[in-house]
Amino acid sequence: MSAFDTIIFEKKDKIAYVTLNRPQALNAYNTRMRDELYQVLDAIKDDDEVQVAILKGAGDKAFCAGADLTEFLSAPSATIARQVRFERDVWGLFLSVPQPLIAAIHGFCLGSGIEIALCCDIRICSEDARFGLPEVGLGIIPAAGGTQTLPRTIGRGKALEMLLSGSLMDAQEAHRIGLVNRVVPRGEVIPAAEQLARKIMEQAPLAVMAAKQAVNRGMDMTLEQGLALERELAMPLMFQGDTREGLKAFKEGRKPKFEGK
C-alpha cells in the first residue's frame, strides 16, 4: 500500500484498488486528492502488472459527495485554476488509462463523484447509492466533464434533467437509464466489482485494451471512421501470441493461458 493523504492505493492479484479516503468529508474531492489521483492513475497506466482497476470510497456514507466547497470558496483566481488544471488534467488522464476501470459506488455520488464514476468504464452501485449534480443550485456548472460524459452515457434528455434540476436519483433509476451497469446489496459492491474484474482478467489483456480503445475513441467518430479504427486495432492482434493461444485452447477445449503478448 502506498502512503497518500487522501487516497489508498493497493495492488493485489493484478487488480489495482484506488480508495478515495476522506470519509470525514464524505470523500469530497479537493486539490490534494486531485494531485494524488494524478500520481496513482499515472502509475496504473504504466504498470504492466495491473490488468483492471477498481475505484471505491472509504467509510459508510459516500463514494464521493462532490468537490470540497470549503476549499472552493478559498480557491485561487480563475487564471491560476485553469493553469493548474492544465498541468494536472486528472480527467484527461482518467480517459487515457488503457486498463478497464470499474467504479464500485455506495452512498452519495454527487458532482465530482459522478464525474469520476463516468470516467470509469463500468459502474456497479449499492442499493443505497444516490446520484446528483447539484452545481446549478450553487450558481456553477460541472467543470470536470460532467456536461459531456453524462449525455454520452444516458442520453441528452435525461442528462439535462439531472443537470438542470439538481435532483437526487436513486440506484434503481440510475440503473434503468444506464448510468450504472448493475445494482447490488450494500455488502456486495466490492465483491461484485472483483468478480467482474476477474472475469475480464480471464480474457486476453491486449484484446481487452484494444476493445476499450475502440469503443472509447469510436464514440466521437462517424461510423465509417469507427470501423476504420476497429480494423486498425484488430489487425495487430492477429499476430500476437495471445491470439495463437486463444485459438489453440479453443480447439483443444481448454481454458487459455494468456500472457499479454
Image (cartoon, grey):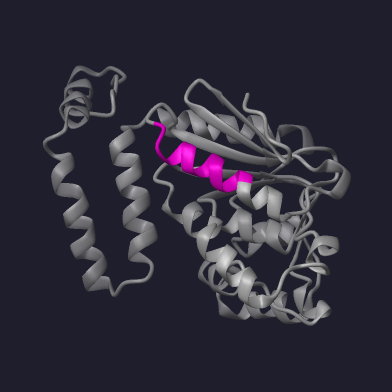
Residue extent of the magenta highlight: 36-47
| Quadrant into which the C terminus falls | top left
Query: Above or below — where is 221 with respect to 103?
Result: below
Residue at 11 percent across and 36 percent down: it is 239
Q: Quadrant of residue 254?
A: top left
Going by the image, does 221 lie left or right of 83? left
The prevailing secondary structure element of the residues shown in magenta is: helix
> How many numbered discs sit on the rendered protein?
0
Residue at 43 percent across and 41 percent down: it is 45
Q: Position of residue 187 (x, y in %)?
A: 77, 32
Query: Above or below — where is 54 with respect to 27?
Result: above
Q: Residue furthest left?
A: 239
Residue at 73 percent across and 38 percent down: it is 5
> Front-most of 187 and 150?
150
Query: Above or below — where is 248 with respect to 237?
Result: above
Q: Position of residue 138 (x, y in %)?
A: 82, 77
> Front-most of 78 and 219?
78
Q: Is residue 135 magenta?
A: no
Going by the image, does 190 lie left or right of 215? right
Q: Position of residue 143 (x, y in %)?
A: 63, 72
Q: Position of residue 175 (x, y in %)?
A: 65, 57
| Quadrant into which the N terminus falls | top right
Residue at 72 percent across and 62 percent down: it is 173
Query: Above or below — where is 166 with respect to 251?
Result: below
Q: Quadrant of residue 131?
A: bottom right
